[in-house]
Image (tube, grey):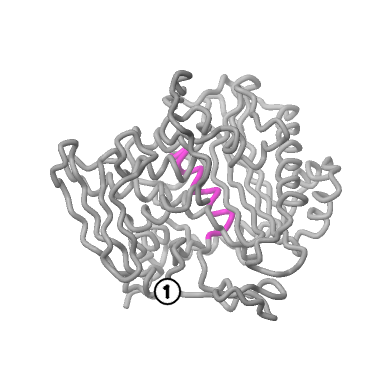
């Protein structure tokens, strides 16, 4: 059997390996240390003082521009290490959304695009069929609606459906070929066995009149995975039978993506020409702008899905801008993806402020689980995790406001337009979601 790794040319693999070694040679630098020293929140300071204990990693990316306005990126890292595992949780929804749009583009099937209605079949044991989507305007599933739901409030089932569309084999081969060599997408959020996760559903696409336009057969991934040495975290854990087990939880065969790879993926979508060609996602411009819209649009702006904005507030999945107001200033947009599970919290963001003409990237992950028990749903997110992200976000934003720039042209995200809800819309709002 061929592994995804075997698909990478030797020269490219060596270049990737060299870049990876260079990338992590310097774990700290004066710039980010100076920013972190301004954080005074006690719990956040505790994380900063003990980064390995909290598995904390931070990558702050300054964006400057030359005389022609071309963005130039400088990455500052704090404890960033591709070997320091964290569970990506919902972060895996980001590459699957990118790959879904890429697959649609490369299929080149007339009448099949992100808006085309879909029916997902049950083609293997435990698979769940999907015929309708009550959150969509036409009540039909589509890649577009999966992306909206996965990005706006990080719903879980849309990830499963994009995984089923792309396929486990294709997803891993594509990410490896693009040079995102830390990536390992092994499972859906369905409680499946390893073998069940290798099987993906048959899918049918229909036109507006309900006529079948394309049928995708069920798929099975025959590639093998190369897993690292055991990744054991925690002191105790709750097993599948809801029993407390005295011993760490095994993350070895779980999903994995390094913080640097996720940051690079986001940069590739926002500024494609700023990364090597092989790292870009092959999507048409309309799909790229669609992706950026829903990475940065707020639930309160979105009519479909009609989320309750008092529950799913504007900063709900914007960890760096979460505060008691739940609001983000209108001149700031955050293009990001977050993940949270097992006590791990992660946010990979691009921030643009069109009032002060600044933009930057900020990525961070942290593990907050003081009782040492994995899978007990008792984590220190509210007392430690979210305050850390909020204080880090504030410190970096304040630093960016004061940072001198040789060239500071007016900034805006060209082509990204946002929706507005109809104030007369009296439909019931969505108050609960699995995320």
Magenta stretch contains residue 402: no
Give the dominant element type of the magenta stretch: helix, strand or loop.
Answer: helix
**In the image, what residue occupies the spot 35% across and 40% down?**
144
**In the image, what residue occupies the spot 62% across and 36% down?**
315
In the rendered structure, the answer to whether residue 37 lies left or right of residue 166 reads: right
Region in magenta = 257-272
The outermost residue toward the bottom is 246
Residue 266 spot, x, y in % from top left = 50, 44
Q: Quadrant of the N terminus?
A: bottom left
- 387 shown above or below 326: below
Judge by depth and name the residue closer to the eye, 242 or 99.
242
Residue 250 spot, x, y in % from top left = 59, 75
Residue 66 spot, x, y in % from top left = 57, 28
Residue 325 spot, x, y in % from top left = 70, 30
Magenta stretch contains residue 269: yes
In the rendered structure, the answer to whether residue 400 lies left or right of residue 90 reads: right
**In the image, what residue occupies the spot 57% across and 52% down?**
339
- 248 shown above or below 338: below
Numbered disc 1: secondary structure = helix
Task: Name the residue carrying label 1.
Answer: 194
């Amino acid at each position: 059997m061929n592994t995804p790794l075997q698909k990478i040319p030797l020269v490219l693999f060596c270049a990737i390996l060299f870049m990876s070694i260079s990338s992590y040679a310097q774990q700290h630098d004066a710039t980010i240390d100076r920013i972190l020293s301004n954080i005074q929140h006690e719990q956040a300071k505790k994380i900063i003082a003990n980064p390995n204990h909290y598995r904390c990693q931070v990558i702050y990316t300054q964006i400057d521009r030359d005389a022609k306005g071309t963005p130039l990126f400088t990455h500052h890292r704090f404890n960033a290490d591709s070997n320091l595992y964290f569970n990506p949780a919902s972060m895996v929804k980001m590459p699957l959304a990118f790959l879904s749009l890429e697959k649609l583009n490369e299929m080149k099937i007339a009448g099949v695009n992100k808006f085309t209605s879909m029916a997902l079949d049950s083609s293997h044991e435990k698979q769940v069929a999907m015929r309708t989507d009550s959150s969509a305007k036409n009540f039909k599933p589509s890649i577009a609606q999966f992306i909206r739901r996965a990005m706006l409030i990080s719903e879980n089932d849309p990830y499963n459906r994009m995984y089923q569309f792309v396929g486990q084999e294709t997803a891993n081969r594509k990410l490896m070929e693009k040079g995102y060599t830390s990536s390992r997408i092994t499972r859906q959020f369905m409680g499946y066995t390893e073998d069940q996760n290798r099987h993906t559903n048959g899918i049918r696409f229909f036109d507006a009149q309900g006529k079948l336009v394309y049928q995708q057969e069920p798929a099975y991934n025959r590639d093998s995975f190369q897993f690292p040495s055991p990744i054991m975290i925690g002191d105790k854990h709750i097993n599948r039978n809801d029993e407390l087990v005295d011993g760490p939880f095994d993350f070895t065969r779980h999903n994995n993506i390094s913080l640097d790879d996720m940051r690079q993926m986001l940069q590739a979508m926002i500024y494609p020409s700023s990364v090597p060609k092989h790292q870009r996602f092959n999507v048409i411009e309309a799909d790229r702008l669609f992706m950026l819209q829903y990475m940065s649009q707020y639930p309160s702006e979105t009519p479909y899905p009609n989320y309750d904005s008092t529950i799913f507030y504007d900063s709900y999945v914007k960890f760096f801008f979460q505060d008691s107001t739940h609001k983000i200033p209108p001149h700031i947009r955050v293009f990001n993806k977050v993940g949270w599970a097992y006590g791990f919290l992660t946010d990979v963001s691009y921030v643009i402020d069109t009032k002060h003409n600044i933009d930057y990237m900020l990525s961070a992950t942290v593990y907050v689980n003081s009782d040492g028990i994995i899978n007990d749903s008792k984590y220190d997110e509210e007392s430690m995790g979210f305050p850390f992200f909020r204080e880090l976000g504030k410190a970096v934003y304040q630093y960016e406001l004061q940072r001198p720039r040789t060239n500071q042209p007016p900034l805006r995200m060209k082509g990204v337009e946002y929706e507005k809800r109809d104030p007369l819309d009296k439909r019931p709002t969505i108050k609960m979601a699995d995320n």
